[in-house]
Structure formats: structure tokens, C-alpha cells
Amino acid sequence: MTTPTAPRLGTALARLLVLAAALLGALLAGAAPASAHAALTGSDPQDGAVVATAPKEVGLTFSEQVAMSADSIRVLDPSGRRADTGEIIDLCSGAVVKYGVALRAGLPDGTYTVAWQTVSADSHPIAGAFTFSIGAPSATSVALPEQAAGGGVVGALYGIARYLSYAGFAVLVGGGAFVLLCWPRGAGVRPVQQTVVRGWLTLTGATLVMLLLRGPYTGSGKLADVFDLAGLQAVLQTKTGAALTSRLLLLGAAALFVAVLFGAYARRTDPKERKDLAFGLGLGGTVVAAGIAGTWALAEHASTGIQPGIAMPVDILHLLAVATWLGGLTTLLVALYRAPSVERAAVERFSRVAFVSVAVLVATGIYQSWRQVGSWSALTGTRYGQLLLVKIGLMAVLVGIAWISRRWTQRLAERTPALPESEVEPESESDPEGAEKDLEDEGLADEGLADQDSGDDRPGDAGADGEDAPEEIAPERAAQLARQRAAVATARRKKARDADPERTGLRRSVLTEAAVAVVLLAVTTVLTSTEPGRTEEEAARTGGTTAGSTAVPDRPVDFRLPFDTGGVDGKGVVRLSLDPGRTGANALHLFVERPNGKPLDVPEIKVNLTLEEKGVGPLPVAPDRIQTGHWSASGVQLPLPGEWRIQVTVRTSEIDQTTIEKNVKIG
């Protein structure tokens, strides 16, 4: 019967890396840029509005706080020239987040384009554009960038750096926790040391890359602007820049922690001194790890929205639990494959630590899910909610595999392979040829261990009696033989360890856990750059840019609706005005125009008003024809405030008609 053996390290890790790269690439490629964490909920003038005279300023209303710069709002005339003064005006009042820009005096009639780009409070860039007209619509030569904010090559590189920063944090924190809590002897194991140090290097490098990319990521989107020192200085003055800088400073303290852990702590032999040092390392390491986790909590989702005072410490706990579990899992995987042996007690201790981490993850995850999603409809109807469901599914799979690993741990035999007497180092005789043959049998012979002569040319060997040979062996040769015998013994212990089926099963289950963890981390990275479901639904309810136009208090609701009935003269635009745009009686005016802006006479036009959330409507409105292209109705009653859907049916012939609609917020 053949005893199963564990897969070779190189092959297993290569497969894991290929899987990680493929899944990460698929997730990042399928992820839309971080386009809307704060949402534009209103503008003055509104999108498509036609105003009689030029306003003094253009105002934008957002769902949450944003960081404005001097160039965040640009108003361009029909020829593409700047029509604003470049002076950003703070119009915020209470819970209303509104900013504007002053317009130049004496603007001519025509269609003006408002292009805006800013950074939401959770550090993600947002941008958009809309048009309004003074006097009458006109042609415009303004060409807006096709690339979304936070997209392109810079956005992809920034996303990869974000993923690597999470991965490096997990390995750094989880690896240190694994050594201190589960396997103190691992502080002296070189593969474990290399793993934790590489985690530190990855996190440090990714943080530096994010700091350099931050300017073009939230601004021009051009990779060449990475070297713009003025842009870097501006980044350092932002909340995200301060968080990244703080992270680099904390990583300096983390480097000291790693040096002590794998230096002074690994060399301590006195139990009391080792225990005292472990306590100090644990306390200091926890403070540093919590500080690094806080740089995410203070700059991203947790710092905005509802209950930030609770959300930020919860987010820190969540990140620490993730790092302890997944980083410890990575370190255990490396130890199982590359360390001489891992005690059963160490694996059992990690199993208990992982259980506590999962419990913390579940508790903090439930709170975060409620806070970011807010409703069952957002859980299934928004991208954030759908990604959250994927993350929950992966967590369930990971917990299931962890249960299998725990079963293997319970069956794991604590074995220390005994060496045959023939392998015990003799006191007074050596056999170099036999040692070299053992090395060849074990596949360990190389120039560094077996580069001496076979013995034919050794001084005193030729013609000497066998009993005199040991006395004539040089000290250097004796030391080399000792190293050879040690290598042989290590190789045989490794072979015996690899032949343990329980240990083999544990390795494979932990490797599978690590593969799923790689995917889970990728989903988490995409999730943190996706608009929360609660924000998306609130933006839709308030008539954000994707859901419709928002009424501005004490001003009429004005918007344009293009239509195409498919017949002759079937294309055009309906320009609708609802005055004063509040509950109660309103005057409704509709202007039907050809694509060139001239009035279009149509046989019939009808309007329906519906407030779905209150079950009101549809309320039919039959406007009267005033003149060519102009229809009007007075006393249109809007009984309740809310998001009203306005449907306009245009008939251009006996058989050609179409219905178009727009959502508006009525206060």
C-alpha cells in the first residue's frame, strides 16, 4: 500500500499564485471604478433646464461631505471656454452638503456644460457632468473625458496596490500573532521569519505606491503625474494622505517589533525573561497593529455615513480579526511545508485563535453589513450588496474547510522520527565515503557538502592501517562530515514527516483554505471601493444623477426629455417646467421642440404623475395647446412630498407615439 505524500512546495505555491493572479485579475477587471460613494443629489440649475437669464452661480448638492479644490467645478460655454470665476463657494447648511461656483457676468445665450470632479469623504474620486441652457438650447463643442474618475491604468494600479496592502497587513499581523500566541519556537525558524518580513515589505511598498498614485488617481488620471511634487504635496494635506503617511510611520514601529521578535525573543532561553518579553511584544504589537488598521478606518467607509464613532473601532476590530486568521493561516501553511516540524499543540492553539477571530468577524461583519446596506432590497439590488453576498458565501466555504483542517489536527500524531543507530554520530570513527553516499541517496549532495576528495589522496591514507585513519583526518574534514551527517538526518526526518498521512491531509486542507482566502481578500478589496448599498439607494430616492432630477426649494422643476416615436418628424425634445415644484397647486408647461431647437407641432401630449412609495397615482394631466410646440395646464395638484415619477406621452401621428419619464423630488 502506497502512503500518500504531500505535494511539493514549489508546485503547490505556484498553483496558489496562479489562482490568486487569475481571480484577482478577474475581480479587478470586472469592477467598475469607484464612481460614486458620495452621490450628486441635486443641482441649480438642474440638468437640462432652460433659464431665462444667466444665474449668478451654479450649485451642486451631494449626499455626503466631499473635498473640493479650486478646479472641482468647471462651467464651460458652448465653445468650451471657462464661464466661471474659479471661486468655489461653500453653500453647506446643516445636513445639506452643497457647493457652488460663481459665473462671469454677461454670459450669452446657449447651452453650458457643468463638469465636476471631487473626492468623497471615504477617499474615493467621483465625477460627472450635465448641461443647462440660457435663453434657448444651442449646439456645444465641449468634449468631456470618456475615462471615469478613478479608472484607467492609474486606477488599476491603485487597486492592485490596495489589494497588496491588505495582504501585507494580514501576513505581518497574522504572522506575528501566530508566533507569539501559537508557536513561540517559530521565532527562530527562518521560513517563518521570511514570511513576516515579506509581509512588512509588501505593506510598506504598497503604501508608498498608493501615496504616489493618489494625486493622479483622484485628479488627472495620467500616470506621468506620479512625479508631480506639487500634486504630492497637495495629497499630503488631505485626509487620505495623512492616513497613508501615518501608516508609514507606524510601519517603522512595526519594523522594530519584527526585529525584536526574530532577534532578542528568538534567542532568549530563560523562561521568565522569554515570558516577560512576549508580554511586551504582544502589548506593543497590538497597539501598532491597531494603529495601522486605524489608518483604513479613519479614511474610508467607516469614517462616513451613520454612527462613525461606533463604526471606526468596529472596523479596526474587523481588520485585526481578518489579519489574525488569514495571516496566521498563511504562516501555518509556510511552516507545514518548509519548517522541519510543527507541533500538534501549535496547530491546536491556532485552531482556537482562528475560532475566536471568526467569532469577532461574524459580530463585526453583521454590524458593518447593516450599516452599509441598510435594507434587504439593497442586499440583492445593489452591486455592494451582491459583492457582500459573495463574501459571505466565501466565508462559509472557508469556515467549512477550516472545520476539515481541525479534524486533521485532532488526528495529527505527534511524531519525532527516531534515527537508526547507524545514523548516530560515532565518537571515534568517520566514514566520509558512506556519508557522501547517504547524501547522494537523499538527493542532498552538492559541491558545498561533498567537494572533498574521495580519500585516495588524503595524507596518511595510502598504505595506512584502518585503525590509524581516524587520527589523520583534518579538523576541517571532521566538521564537514558532521554537517553531512546532520543533513542526512534532517532529510530522513523530513521524509518520515512527509509520509505521515494526517500531516499530509492537514497540509492540503490548509492550502485549500489559503486559496479561498486569496479570493476572499480580493472580493474585500473590491467591496471597499464600491458604493455602499445604503448610499446608492438613498441617492436613487432623492433623485440622484442616475435616478432623475431633484427639485430645488422655491424654484421650478425644469428638465428636458428626448423622444423618438419612430415616424416622420418623430424625433425631438420635450422641455417640461413645473412651477413652483412643491406640494399643492403647480403650473405645468411643456415645450415640444425639434432636434434643432425649433417648435414642433404634435397632435397630442399627455402627462401622468405617480408617487409609488405612497401609492398615489397615476394622476392624469391633460394639458391644453397654447401655440405651436407649447402646451400648458394650471392647478396641477401634488398632494404629498416625495419622489414623483412624471411620464409624458407624445403622439406625432395617428399611429406613432412614445412615453418618456423622469423622477423628481418634490418637497
Image (cartoon, rainbow, N blue to C red):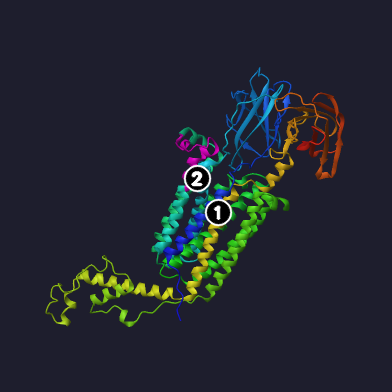
Could you tell whether 568 is left or right of 532 in the image? Answer: right
Most common secondary structure along the magenta stretch: helix
Where residue 298 sits, quadrant-wise, is top right
Could you tell whether 431 is left or right of 607 in the image? Answer: left
Could you tell whether 445 is left or right of 264 in the image? Answer: left
Residue placed most toward the observer, 351 or 448: 448
Q: Is residue 83 above or below residue 476?
A: above
Could you tell whether 253 is left or right of 564 in the image? Answer: left
Where residue 497 appears, x then y in whole percent?
42, 74
Q: Secondary structure at mark 2?
A: helix
Where residue 548 sits, quadrant-wise, is top right
Q: Residue at x 14, y 76 (%)?
A: 461
| Callout 1 crowding tier (Cα within 10 Å): few <14, some 14–19, many ≥20 | many
Would residue 375 be visible to someone looking at this image?
Answer: no
Q: What segment carries the magenta color?
A: 206-228
Q: Is residue 54 above or below residue 392?
A: above
224 part of magenta stretch: yes
Where residue 616 appears, x then y in whole percent?
85, 42
Q: Residue at x 61, y 57 (%)?
A: 391
Name the residue at the top extreme.
Answer: 106
Q: Amino acid at mark 2?
A: Leu
Q: Secondary structure at mark 1?
A: helix
| Callout 2 crowding tier (Cα within 10 Å): few <14, some 14–19, many ≥20 | some
Where residue 535 appears, x then y in whole percent?
68, 44
Q: Identify the residue position indicated by label 2 in the image.
A: 157
Q: Is residue 6 above or below residue 614?
A: below
Q: Identify the residue position indicated by label 1 in the image.
A: 522
| Location of the C terminus (image quadrant) | top right
Would residue 595 be visible to someone looking at this image?
Answer: yes
